[in-house]
Image (cartoon, grey):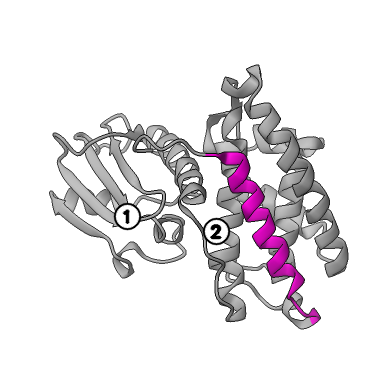
């Protein structure tokens, strides 16, 4: 990410602290309100995060690694917790996110760090990126599904956390593009995201997405790092955010219309 070294452990601890602080201020009615994640209440979003932190330490890990629809797997985990109390949901989240905050950084620092782990249809990722996935999940759900649904200000973030969020998003996007191999992708394309944690990435004709310059690119896409988690997950349209195109506009538009990081 443009030469920036991320501290994934610190990023996850900061996101966990923000989530716990946010949840501590919720009243019973707010727990039951709809979030902006379709079909999920605020309580269900927290249940998803708690279940996600717990899953790697349970038999559900195999479902995530070998499945072919991660969204269905997420919904099933939330459904099993629909009748839980808010207190029980929060207790599970607090316990297992605490375990994840200790264990995942140890894995990332071990010889297992480079082992490629399958994650359903999203492809394979090195174990060291597990904390990055968790940071992305927390960041996106809290700032784009929970806070705006309740009319509350979203917690501020920082460059380190955004570096980790974008690290995961670009890894997923790279796997998605390489798996799709769209026929129109026949020239390099460049993405630059400005602001905290931002950088420049090069999309190759093979679909790979990696840090790199815009030299020789058919099109250049410029945007804001803080906005990418929203439009990059299709919670907002990229045309409704600060996204600018130079070079081959049709080529860049075709790419932008395919981006949907889950």
Asked whether 172 or 168 is in front, the reply is 168
Q: Residue furthest top?
A: 111
Q: SS for tag 2?
A: helix
The residue depicted at 65 percent of the width and 61 percent of the height is 18
Q: Report x, y in % for residue 154.
A: 55, 70
Question: Rounded to the nearest whole Å, what is the CA distance between mark 2 and mark 1?
Answer: 20 Å
Kindly identify which numbered label has been placed on residue 164.
none
**Residue 64 highlighted magenta (yes or no):** no
The residue depicted at 33 percent of the width and 67 percent of the height is 241
Q: Report x, y in % for residue 66.
A: 66, 32
10 to the left or right of 62: left
Residue 69 visible, this angle: no
Q: Bin the neighbour count of mark 1 within 10 Å (Cα to Cα): few under 14, some 14-19, many 20 and up.
A: few
**Splitting the image into 4 quarters, where does residue 219 fall?**
top left
Residue 241 visible, this angle: yes
Asked whether 106 or 144 is in front, the reply is 106
Report the quarter where the N terminus lies.
Answer: top left
Q: SS for tag 1?
A: loop
**Splitting the image into 4 quarters, where does residue 177 fall?**
top left
The answer to whether residue 31 is above or below residue 74 is: below
Asked whether 170 or 194 is in front, the reply is 194
**Splitting the image into 4 quarters, where does residue 174 fall?**
top left
Q: Which residue is mark 1?
A: 257
Magenta span of residues: 7-28
67 to the left or right of 136: right
Q: Report x, y in % for residue 130.
A: 62, 37
Label 2 vs label 1, nearer the camera: 2
The answer to whether residue 214 is above or below residue 50 is: above
Q: Bin the neighbour count of mark 2 within 10 Å (Cα to Cα): few under 14, some 14-19, many 20 and up.
A: some
Circle nearer the N terminus (2, 1): 2
**Residue 26 highlighted magenta (yes or no):** yes
Kindly identify which numbered label has been placed on residue 140.
2
């Amino acid at each position: 990410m443009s030469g920036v070294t991320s501290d994934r452990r610190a990023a996850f601890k900061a996101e966990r602290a923000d989530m716990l602080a946010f949840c501590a201020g919720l009243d019973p009615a707010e727990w039951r309100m709809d979030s902006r994640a379709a079909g999920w209440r605020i309580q269900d979003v927290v249940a998803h995060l708690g279940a996600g932190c717990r899953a790697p330490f349970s038999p559900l890990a195999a479902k995530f690694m070998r499945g072919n629809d991660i969204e269905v797997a997420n919904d099933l985990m939330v459904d099993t917790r629909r009748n839980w109390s808010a207190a029980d949901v929060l207790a599970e989240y607090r316990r297992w996110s605490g375990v994840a905050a200790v264990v995942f950084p140890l894995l990332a620092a071990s010889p297992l760090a480079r082992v490629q782990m399958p994650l359903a249809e999203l492809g394979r990722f090195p174990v060291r990126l597990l904390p990055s996935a968790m940071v992305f999940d927390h960041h996106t759900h809290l700032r784009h599904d929970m806070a705006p649904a309740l009319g509350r200000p979203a917690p501020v973030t920082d460059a380190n956390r955004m570096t980790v969020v974008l690290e995961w998003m670009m890894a997923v996007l790279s796997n998605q593009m390489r798996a799709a191999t769209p026929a129109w992708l026949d020239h390099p394309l460049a993405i630059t995201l400005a602001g905290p944690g931002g950088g420049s990435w090069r999309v190759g004709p093979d679909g790979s997405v990696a840090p790199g310059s815009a030299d020789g690119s058919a099109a250049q896409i410029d945007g804001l790092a803080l906005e990418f988690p929203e439009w990059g997950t299709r919670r907002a349209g990229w045309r409704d955010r600060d996204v600018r195109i130079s070079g081959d506009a049709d080529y860049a538009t075709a790419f932008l219309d395919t981006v949907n990081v889950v």
